[in-house]
Amino acid sequence: MHLYLNYARAHWCKPDENPPVGLILCTEKGEAEARYALDGLPGPVMAGEYRMLLPDEQLLTARLQEWQARAISA
């Protein structure tokens, strides 16, 4: 994910845009895999909610804004 976000920031983002955000959707909770995959990344990583269906667009947008606000205030 880090590779793709760096590429997107370098090649697709405009100078006045916020950096891209990665969203990983999984069907199973794999704590060991997540720990080793995410350890040492420079930015905050938030995980912990698992759903079998993607929420509707309004709810997803609200959750992303909520998580962003928490990350900024942390």
Image (tube, grey):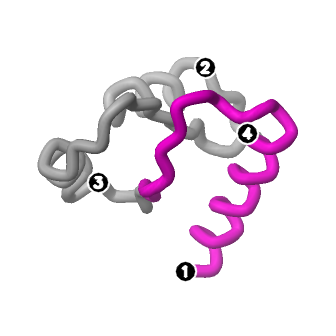
Residue shown at 38%/29% (left/top)?
Answer: 27
- Looking at the image, do the residues carrying marks 2 and 3 touch, with CB atoms under 8 Å apart? no
Question: What residue occupies the far top of the structure in this picture?
Answer: 11
Task: Quote the CA–CA distance across marks 4 and 2.
Answer: 10 Å
Query: Which amino acid type corresponds to the residue marked 2 in the rendered image?
Result: Trp
Between disc 2 and disc 1, whose residue precedes?
A: 2
Which of the labelled discs sits on residue 41, or is there none? Answer: 3
Query: Which amino acid type corresponds to the residue marked 1 in the rendered image?
Result: Ala
Residue 65 within the magenta-colored segment of the rendering: yes
Between disc 4 and disc 2, whose residue precedes?
A: 2
The residue labelled by disc 1 is 74
The residue labelled by disc 2 is 12
For the residues carrying marks 1 and 4, which lies nearer the camera in this image?
1
Q: Residues within 10 Å of mark 2 (few under 14, many from 20)?
A: few
- Label 4, secondary structure: give it: loop
- Looking at the image, do the residues carrying marks 1 and 4 touch, with CB atoms under 8 Å apart? no
Query: Which amino acid type corresponds to the residue marked 3 in the rendered image?
Result: Leu
- Label 1, secondary structure: give it: loop
Residue range of the region highlighted in magenta in the rendering: 46-74
Residue 7 occupies quadrant: top left
